[in-house]
Image (tube, rainbow, N blue to C red):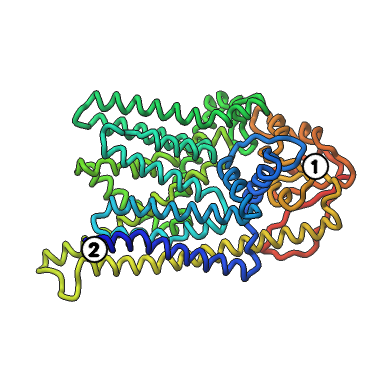
């Protein structure tokens, strides 16, 4: 009994201790390089700006001019705002929240691995592989909402499995509540409940009680839809109050609702949908967070074996949920994002990485089992070998492999952060002496500028400037004449464009380009114009 307890304790404690060590080393390396309080993605700074306004003014805006609807990351921003009240600033709060979520994710992953793999050593190996993968540490360093959404999706998956073990609690409401919270990050997470509901109803149809279980699953599925509607009601009400529509579409969407019918008739929608679904599926299995295509192939192998096992063994049928989620969610999310246009595919797909790594761990842990079976058929294992030793050997090799991938991922993230910091420094120097003198900044990347300079902003993406949403034409693009009409256009106001997609705006304003001087070719810089 004592031996079993110590094994279980090690299975839980070792991954958490290793994760704490890896996070500490990575953050200390960031601090020593002067990049501790910097991020690569502009959207991270936008989240920090909204969190600051929530903490200081109890309102959701980037400047005090106009309230902004929470179209994405509302849960992440709110939690960062709450933690920042004690942490002192939003950047430290983001690190703390990401670390807490990563710890919870590891605990849920360990519980799933212990249920999927028969031996404690196998579960410990799976957890070690997960902790050593590039996903956790790199996500914390990026400071994005992905780690929170991954925690919620993994928790919903674990609760669903527990409900499937007991026929009376199929499709538990607790899983729906977690998915509803994830919808406060991206609305597209509703497809997770759709997939779980279909899976639960299909599995119930093959159960012992037949129609009664199917009826129960349908009722619980509908009750889960009610939970999702209840949780998203505040967001929809805010949109109706501010924008007079339940949920606006951002300019980054491929299609508007007005253009939907014509696109469907012309075949454009099918072409866009096909390309979007293929990219979504490819981004999951080739994601850097799982270690690249090699790990993706092995994860697909594990998923295939798990599917066959779930079909053949009734007691493991509930685990067919894993391949169902990994195969169905990316294409369904891609279809929804064609209309919403807020980049939700990447977030939803990245949130599935823990499930991919669970499938990968299951696949690779079959290696020592297969070797042991072969040795038994050929006369038994050598004296110096055992199934446990083979499991440890495979785990050590894969952990070292994953750690190498993690080091590369951290180096890549640090390089991106350094380039972003260099670009921001050059902009600050060139826009000196005083960026807080009441100028209006019009840009397609508003996050870092809004966080560092509290002044009037126009966000061409539309997320933080509601009037941009009114400038979307029926074809889905921006009407730059209407955008220019909404600009103040005072002499000295600044136009900063990181992308060439908005160059047409220059046809409607009188401005001269500002030279930024010589910069490093590896540093991505915007083009800057000053209004005449």
**Is 78 placed left or right of 397 in the picture?**
right
Q: Quadrant of residue 248?
A: top right
Residue positioned 41% across, 30% down in the render:
224
Q: Is residue 280 visible?
A: yes
Q: Is residue 334 visible?
A: no
Q: Position of residue 250 (x, y in %)?
A: 63, 35
Give the SS element for disc 2.
Answer: helix
Residue positioned 62% across, 55% down in the render:
87
Position of the C terminus by quadrant: top right
Q: Which mark is residue 2?
A: 2
Q: Position of residue 61 (x, y in %)?
A: 70, 40
Kindly report the distance in space between the C-alpha atoms of the residues bearing marks 1 and 2.
74 Å
Q: Residues within 10 Å of mark 1 (few under 14, many from 20)?
A: some
Q: Position of residue 65 (x, y in %)?
A: 77, 37
Whichever of labels 1 and 2 marks the residue nearer the N terminus, that label is 2
Residue nearest the observer in this picture, 24 or 473: 24
C-beta proximity under 8 Å, tags 1 and 2? no
Q: Which mark is residue 506?
A: 1
In this rendering, the label closer to the viewer, 1 or 2: 2
**Is 100 placed left or right of 321 in the picture?**
right
Q: Quadrant of residue 255?
A: top right
Marker count (numbered): 2
Residue nearest the observer in this picture, 265 or 257: 257
Position of the N terminus by quadrant: bottom left
Residue nearest the observer in this picture, 341 or 449: 449
Residue positioned 84% across, 46% down in the render:
439
Q: Position of residue 451 (x, y in %)?
A: 71, 50
Residue positioned 79% across, 43% down in the render:
456
């Amino acid at each position: 009994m004592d031996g079993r307890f110590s094994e279980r304790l090690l299975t839980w404690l070792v991954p958490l201790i290793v994760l704490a060590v890896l996070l500490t080393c990575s953050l200390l390396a960031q601090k020593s390089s002067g990049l501790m309080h910097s991020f690569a993605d502009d959207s991270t700074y936008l989240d920090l700006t909204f969190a600051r306004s929530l903490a200081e003014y109890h309102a959701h805006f980037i400047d005090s001019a106009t309230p902004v609807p929470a179209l994405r990351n509302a849960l992440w921003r709110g939690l960062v705002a709450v933690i920042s009240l004690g942490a002192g600033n939003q950047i430290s709060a983001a690190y703390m929240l990401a670390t807490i979520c990563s710890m919870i994710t590891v605990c849920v992953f360990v519980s799933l691995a212990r249920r999927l793999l028969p031996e404690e050593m196998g579960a410990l190996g799976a957890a070690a592989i997960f902790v050593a993968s590039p996903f956790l540490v790199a996500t914390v360093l990026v400071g994005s909402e992905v780690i929170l959404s991954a925690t919620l999706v993994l928790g919903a998956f674990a609760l669903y499995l527990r409900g499937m073990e007991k026929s009376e609690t199929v499709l538990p409401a607790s899983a729906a509540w977690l998915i509803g919270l994830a919808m406060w990050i991206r609305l597209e997470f509703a497809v997770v409940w759709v997939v779980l509901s279909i899976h639960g109803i299909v599995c119930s149809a093959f159960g012992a009680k037949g129609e009664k279980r199917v009826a129960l699953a349908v009722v619980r599925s509908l009750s889960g839809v009610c939970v999702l509607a209840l949780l998203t009601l505040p967001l929809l009400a805010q949109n109706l109050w501010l924008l007079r529509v339940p949920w606006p579409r951002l300019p980054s969407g491929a299609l508007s609702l007005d253009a939907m019918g014509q696109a469907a008739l012309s075949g454009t929608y099918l072409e866009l949908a096909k390309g979007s679904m293929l990219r979504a599926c490819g981004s999951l299995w080739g994601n850097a967070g799982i270690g690249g295509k090699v790990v993706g192939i092995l994860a697909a192998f594990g998923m295939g074996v798990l599917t066959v096992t779930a079909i053949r063994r009734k007691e493991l049928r509930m685990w067919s949920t894993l391949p169902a989620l990994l195969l169905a969610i990316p294409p369904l999310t891609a279809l929804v994002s064609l209309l919403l246009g807020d980049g939700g595919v990447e977030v939803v797909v990245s949130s599935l990485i823990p499930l991919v790594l669970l499938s990968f761990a299951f696949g690779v842990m079959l290696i020592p089992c297969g070797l042991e079976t072969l040795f038994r058929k050929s006369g038994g294992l050598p004296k110096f070998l055992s199934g446990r030793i083979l499991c440890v050997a495979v785990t050590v090799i894969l952990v070292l492999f994953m750690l190498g991938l993690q080091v590369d991922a951290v180096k890549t993230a640090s390089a991106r952060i350094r380039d972003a910091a260099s670009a921001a420094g050059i902009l600050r120097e060139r826009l000196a002496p005083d960026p807080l003198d009441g100028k209006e900044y019009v840009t397609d990347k508003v996050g870092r500028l809004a966080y560092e300079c509290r002044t009037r902003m126009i966000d061409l993406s539309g997320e933080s400037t509601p009037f941009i949403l009114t400038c979307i034409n029926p074809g889905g693009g921006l009407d730059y004449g209407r955008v220019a009409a909404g600009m103040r256009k005072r002499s000295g106001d600044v136009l900063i464009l990181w992308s060439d997609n908005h160059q047409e705006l220059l046809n409607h304003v009188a401005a001269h380009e500002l030279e930024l001087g010589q910069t490093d070719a590896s540093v991505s810089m915007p083009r800057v114009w000053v209004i005449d």
